[in-house]
Amino acid sequence: MSIKKVHLRYSLDKKSKELDFIKSVSNNDLNIIFDTGEWNNGNRINMKIFPKTKMKIEELYIETACDLKEDSLTYLNGYQTWTDSREFKLSEKIPKLSRLVWPIMSMYGDYAFIKNKNKLSSWTYTYIKNSDEIELIGSLSESSGYTIFQYDSNGVLTIIKDCCGLVIDDEYEAFDIFAVKGEENFCFDKYFEAMKLPKPKVKSCTGWTSWYNYYTNITEDIILDNLKAFKSRNIPIDIFQIDDGYQEYVGDWLRINSKFPRGMKVIADEVKASGYKAGIWLAPFICEKKSEIYKKHPEWVIKKAGFNPGWSGMFYVLDFYNEEFRNYLREVFKTVFEEWNYDMVKLDFLYAAALIEREDKTKGQIMYEAMKFLRELAGDRLILGCGVPLGCSFGLVDYCRIGSDVALKWEDKLLKRLHYRERVSTINSLTSTIGRRHLNNRAFLNDPDVFIVRSKGVELDKNQRYSLLLLNLIFGGLVFTSDNLDEYIEEEMKLYKSIFPIKDKKISKVIEDEILRVYLSIDDNEYLALCNLNSEQVVIKNKDEVYFCREKGYIPKNAVVTLEPYESICLLKTENVDENLLRSSNIFMI
C-alpha cells in the first residue's frame, strides 16, 4: 500500500479551504503531523491535526494504491453486528436498500450516511486477498471516529475518516492505521497486538436463551420449565439467559410485566441454584412509544431508531449525554447486578447511541464513549454486545454478536430482494459467522447466534440445522440454543449432547470455493469440515490426506465425496481410528 495523497477540506468562519499533502503540514490555520513507517512487522500511518483556532472538518481521506488484481478478493466488514460481512470480488456491488422499506429499515445500517454508495465499503478494517496471502489494513482506534475503507475497481483504496461536520479547537487524532501482509492468522495477530488490547478474559461457553423459541411470549413458567429441563438432565451449559419479553415496555427495565409475578430476582436465584450463570437482555439506549420513559422524559428522547412490529412500532434513541438518563441507567445496572443478582447482560440495539448528531463529536466517538460507559456500569460482570458497530466494542465486551439474527428458515427471500443487509436469515447469519471468524478470541469471543437442533416449529431441514450447529461450534466462542429439551426426539437429544464438552478450536485455513472447507485442530486431532451451503448437490474430490467420519467411513486421498444440498460433514485426519474415538459421543469424536 502506497500513499497517493491525503485530502483535508475544512472551514473557518464559513470559508472553505482545501489541502492535499503526503507529509506534515503547517499554515496559519493548523499544524498537521503526518507520520508513516515500519512497525510491528507492518506499516503504520498516524495523523494528528492541531488547529490554531476553531475549525470545522468537512472532508478527510487518504488515497492509496494497493496490490489489487482483477481476481483479488476484498474483505468488507459491515457497519454493525447484523450487517453481512464477507469477501467480495472487485466486480461485485453492494445493492441499494429498496426505497419501499427505507423509512423503517435504513436506521439499522449505513444506508443514510455512507458516501459513494456505488463503491465497496468496509468499516474499521479490511483486507485484500491474493492467493494464500492477505494485506490487512485496519484502524487501531475508532475512538476518534469511524474509519471507512472504499475500493475502486481501478486499484485505489480510499481510507475515509467519518468526521464530516466535526468542530475542533484542540488536538484531534484523525488516523491511526496499521497495514500488514502475510498469512491470515499472522496478520490478525499483528493487528490486534498493535491495538494493545488485553486478551479476552472469558473462555468459550455454552448456554440457552429464550428468544428463538418463544420470542416476547415468555412467562415465568416457560423460563422455569426450560431451566428444569436442563437441570434434570445435568446438561453442563454455562449461561441461562432471559431475553426480551419480561419488561412492561422497552425502556422501562425496572417495570416487570404480569407474566413474571414474582419479579426477575427469583429467576436469577433459580438459575444460579441450578449451577448456571444468569443472563438477562437489555436495550439500554432505546425506548418504545408506550414506555413511561417516553411519556415522562421527552427531554431524553432524540429521534427514531427503528421499527419493530413486536413492540409498539417505531422506537427511539435516548440521549446518552443527558446526565439524568445516565443516572437512570446506573440505577438499572445496579438493580440488575446487585439486587436481582444477574451475572451477564445481553445489551442490544447499541448502534442507536451513534444516531445522535453533535458537532463536537463524531458518530464513532459517541459510540465508543457509550460502550465505555456501559463497561463502567457492568464492572467485572459479563457483557454480550449486539447490534453494535464492532470496532467501538473491541476490548469493551466479553462476547459479541458477529452476524444477523438466525431465522427459523434458511433465507428471507423478500428481504433479500429488498437488499436489506441486516435481515433475519440463517444463511445471512452464517455468512458473517464465517467472514468475521478472525475476531474470535482477539477482540472478544464471537457469538454466532443460536443453533437449532429441534425439528418442531421450524422450516430448516435436517442438513440445514446440522450445518448451522457445526459452523457455530467451529467459529463460535459463545454457543447458545433456544430449544426446549423436553420436545427433543431421541436423535435430537443425542445430537445436542454431542457438543459437550466444548473445547477450543484452532482454525488454520478457510477456503471458500464451490463449498466451504475449514481446516481446524482440537487438542492433538486435526479435522476438515466440508460444508455445502447451497441448494444444489456438490461432488468434490478429496485432495488432502486420509480422513474418517462416522457417516461416510474412511475417505482416502483422491476419493470422491458427494454433499447433498446444505449438507456438512466433519472429517478426522487419520490413517487409523482409535477405538476410543469411535466410542465417543462427541460431535468431533474427541
Image: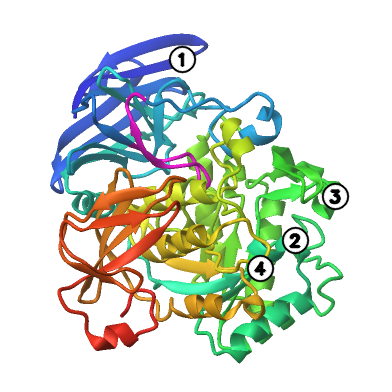
Does dot 1 land on a helix, a strand or a loop?
A: strand
Proximity of marks 3 and 1: CB atoms separated by less than 8 Å: no
What is the three-letter code of the residue carrying label 2?
A: Thr
Image vertical order of residue 416 relative to residue 191, above or below: above
Q: In which quarter of the view is residue 474 placed? A: bottom left
Colour scheme shown: rainbow
- The residue beneath circle 1 is 11
Quarter of image, res 60: top left
In the rendered structure, which disc, 2 or 4, sits on the residue that comes first in sequence? 4
Q: Secondary structure at mark 4?
A: loop
Can you identify the residue that label 2 sits on?
A: 216
Relative vertical location of residue 383 with respect to residue 91 in this rendering, above or below:
below
Q: Mark 4 vs mark 1: give the one in front.
A: 4
The reply, left or right, for residue 586 in relation to residue 428 is: left
Q: How many marks?
A: 4
Q: Is residue 353 above or below residue 192?
A: above
Q: Which residue bears the numbered disc 3?
A: 290
Residue highlighted by disc 4 = 210
Question: What type is the residue that disc 4 sits on?
Answer: Ser
Task: State which region is magenta.
Answer: 75-91
Q: Amino acid at mark 1?
A: Ser
Say whether disc 3 or disc 1 marks the residue closer to the N-terminus.
1
